[in-house]
Image (cartoon, rainbow, N blue to C red):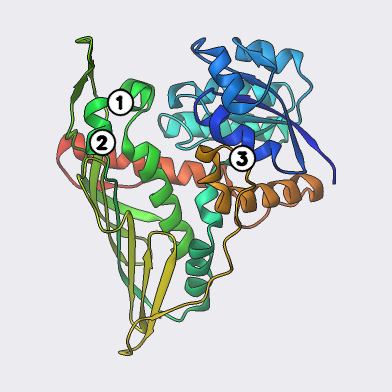
Amino acid sequence: MEKYRVGIIGTGFGAKVHAPMMNHHDGFDVVAISSVSRGNIEEARKASEIENIYTDWRQMIEQETLDLLVVASAVHLHKEMVAAAFEKGVHVVCEKPMAMDVAETEEMITERAKAGKLGLINHEFRFLPARTKVKEIMESGKLGGIMHVRYECSFANYTGLTTKPRGWLGQEEKGGGMLGAIGSHMTDALQWWLDSSFKEVFARLPIHIPSQTDENGNTEHRTADDAFQIIGSLENGATVTLELLSAARQTEHTWRLEIYGTEGTLVMLDDKKVLLSAGNSPLEEVELVPDIEAPATMPQIAARYYNGFQRALDALHETLASGKKHPYLADFEHGHATQKVLDAVRTSALEGRKMEVK
């Protein structure tokens, strides 16, 4: 199997998840990682098990011979980093959300076209067995015409939000917030499953925990949402509700998806279980392909993502080797389609009115 040389920008998710995931795959070799804010280099080296750590991402792109760059930095830096990679003739996998707004995503698509390289968005959740089963069922037409979708996410993270800093994720000006971090996944999944785009949205973006003070009296003030509620409709006529709460004390399900069609109902619980009903029959569990277990040597934080991420890397390697994009990989056009929804949601929440997605 041919190995592709990978550089990663970002010592958070990039070093802790992307690096070990890729280095445990036979088709990738992470040759370098760069920090963005000159963070703890030794901590990044330990988390990633990569010795070659840069403090200047531009220098890494210039000096290393790369086939692929993973951009896992704060969102407000994505566009500049992606453009630099394409200028160097390197394929790109960019973390979601793709950028700060649609003007930036349009520029990134233009740069990709000029370079003639791959531009992909890391929506590894698409490859979880439960989610691919939802995609198969939707493509089969078993549910008939789709009337309504209810998609909810609740994190029991009240203690974390009140005791730990959010960093850039809590800062709106840096592209932080749960709408971008998780809403991008949910929006992408819905448009992918239903093969239809959002038409309009009405939304709220609360900050339930607006600040956090540490034991030394240092206070972090947050400007980015830690929850969202979205009511919308799709071009195919379906109505949609999307909801996320990250400050729950306790929750029964982290993820719950319900899709109601004219011929049946589908329910997905916690990305682990899919239930299907035909007509008025009871919901019955659908068999999924078996989970794949992470190697014992993989760090625990990365191992949590293994079941979907490993499959996504298989698809990425297949795409690089064949030159033909795997149908489940999200590209920059998917990222742009999601960005249009995120932009409309933010405007709706700011102005308190329904917004057309365009």
Q: Secondary structure at mark 3?
A: loop
Residue shown at the point (48%, 35%) measured from the top left: 98
Q: Residues within 10 Å of mark 2 (few under 14, many from 20)?
A: many
- Across and down, in percent, residue 122 comes to 55, 42
Ranked by sequence position, the earlier of labels 2 and 3 is: 2
Residue shown at the point (60%, 10%) measured from the top left: 56
Q: Nearer the viewer, residue 46 or 62?
A: 46
Residue 127: name its quadrant. bottom right
The residue carrying mark 2 is 226
Badge 1 vs badge 2, beta-carbon distance below 8 Å: yes
User: What kind of residue is marked 3?
Assistant: Met
Q: Nearer the viewer, residue 59 or 336?
A: 59
Residue shown at the point (59%, 10%) measured from the top left: 55
Residue 283: name its quadrant. bottom left
Ranked by sequence position, the earlier of labels 1 and 3 is: 1
Residue shown at the point (26%, 41%) measured from the top left: 246
Quadrant showing the C terminus: top left
User: What kind of residue is marked 2?
Assistant: Asp
Q: Is residue 114 above or below residue 332?
A: above
Residue furthest to the left in view is: 352
User: What kind of residue is marked 1?
Assistant: Gly
Badge 2 vs badge 3, beta-carbon distance below 8 Å: no
Ranked by sequence position, the earlier of labels 1 and 2 is: 1
- Across and down, in percent, residue 354 comes to 20, 47
- Across and down, in percent, residue 45 comes to 61, 20
The residue carrying mark 3 is 298
Q: Residues within 10 Å of mark 1 (few under 14, many from 20)?
A: many
Is residue 11 something one can see in this rendering?
yes
The residue carrying mark 1 is 170
Mark-to-mark CA distance, 2 and 3 = 30 Å
Q: Secondary structure at mark 1?
A: helix
